[in-house]
């Protein structure tokens, strides 16, 4: 009888454990995140690597998406719940097509203080400023946002279409294209620009291009991208969205407090080499709660300017698509 009792007790324990294990797994809420493996996605990498999503009982599924258009399309189609970074022009244009598809919980500032986009010129091509690029063959980072800003900056420097040739090219190919002499100059992003300078392939003509062109001040905050979640995600799973945002914003706080430590997360998550990790500049990461009226006003000016460039059918009030947690 004692043997039978022990066996029965063991069986009961096994059954209890068998039922307990699945419930532990269920405790992790899954969130699909579109991820572009670039420096502007740093909050995602920090939150993932430091376990902040796990702290919030969230299991993220990384959906690799290269550039803004596929990210916007995935948000519109409800294929992802959030995105590590989305160009704000493309995000607001997405909201015209499907209101609330892209709601920003943090924004990335680009300027001379936070260099990201810049014009570069290959070694051997005679140009000391953007206005010297007349007749040049110029590459651009891909996506309508980058191409339009490149053209706007060229126009602001007295160059109209026909004075140059501009082609968009995947950023990973920029270094090789300038080294080979296929292009004379480029509107490129970090860390590519730093790698070009380190290898003696190209020099920077101008940083803070968008802030100077659109806001009239190279040190102003040009909020060109940011981390987003969808309204569908917030509506259908509000508590999960809140926990996701908590993990995200904890990572943003880490970056602001100790950027040198945070930038190390780019090594295993992007193509940034060890030789460049300490030199590449990063954008300024801001939680939406940190934006004041002046910052939001600058953001609105950038979006208004950009929407005119793409002949958008309507204006967008940026405050509608900013979420504070």
Image: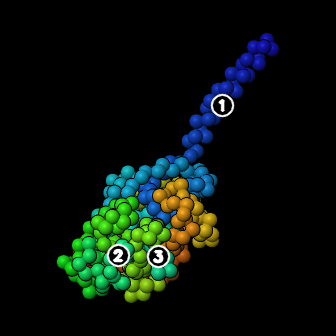
Give the Cα distance between marks 3 and 2.
24 Å
State the image coordinates of residue 209 (x, y, percent, origin top left).
39, 80
Q: Residue furthest right?
A: 2
Residue at horizontal 43 percent and vertical 85 percent from the top: 218
Residue identifier under label 2: 124
Query: Which marked residue is nearer to the observer: mark 3 or mark 1?
Result: 3
- In the structure shown, which secondary structural element does the residue marked by tag 1 occupy? helix
Residue at horizontal 39 percent and vertical 80 percent from the top: 205
Residue at horizontal 62 percent and vertical 29 percent from the top: 18
Front residue (pair 240, 143): 143
Residue identifier under label 3: 115
Give the Cα distance between marks 1 and 2.
70 Å
The label on residue 147 is none
The label on residue 17 is 1
State the quadrant of the C terminus: bottom right
- The reply, left or right, for residue 154 in relation to residue 109 is left
State the image coordinates of residue 150 (x, y, percent, origin top left).
31, 75
- In the structure shown, which secondary structural element does the residue marked by tag 3 occupy? loop
């Amino acid at each position: 009888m004692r043997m039978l009792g022990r066996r029965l007790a063991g069986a009961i324990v096994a059954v209890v454990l068998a039922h307990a294990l699945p419930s532990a797994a269920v405790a992790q809420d899954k969130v699909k995140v579109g991820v572009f493996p670039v420096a502007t996605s740093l909050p995602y990498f920090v939150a993932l690597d430091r376990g902040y999503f796990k702290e919030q009982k969230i299991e993220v599924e990384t959906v690799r998406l290269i550039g803004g258009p596929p990210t916007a399309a995935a948000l519109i189609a409800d294929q992802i719940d959030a995105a590590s970074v989305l160009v704000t022009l493309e995000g607001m244009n997405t909201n015209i097509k499907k209101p609330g598809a892209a709601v920003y919980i943090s924004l990335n500032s680009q300027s001379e203080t936070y260099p990201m986009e810049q014009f570069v010129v290959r070694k051997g091509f005679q140009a000391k400023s953007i206005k010297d690029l007349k007749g040049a063959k110029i590459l651009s980072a891909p996506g309508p946002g980058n191409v339009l800003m490149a053209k706007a900056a060229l126009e602001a420097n007295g160059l109209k279409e026909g004075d140059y040739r501009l082609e968009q090219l995947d950023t990973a190919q920029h270094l090789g294209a300038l080294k080979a002499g296929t292009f004379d100059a480029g509107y490129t992003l970090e860390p590519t620009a730093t790698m070009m300078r380190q290898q003696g392939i190209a020099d920077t003509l101008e940083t803070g291009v968008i802030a100077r062109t659109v806001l009239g001040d190279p040190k102003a905050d040009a909020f060109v991208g940011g981390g987003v979640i969808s309204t569908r995600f917030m509506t259908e799973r509000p508590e999960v969205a809140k926990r996701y945002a908590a993990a995200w914003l904890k990572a943003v706080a880490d970056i602001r407090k100790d950027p040198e430590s945070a930038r190390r997360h780019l090594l295993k998550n992007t193509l940034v080499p060890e030789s460049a990790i300490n030199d590449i500049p990063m954008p300024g990461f801001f939680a939406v709660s940190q934006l004041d009226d002046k910052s939001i006003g600058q953001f609105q000016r950038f979006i208004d300017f950009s929407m005119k460039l793409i002949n958008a059918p309507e204006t967008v009030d940026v405050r509608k698509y900013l979420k504070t947690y």
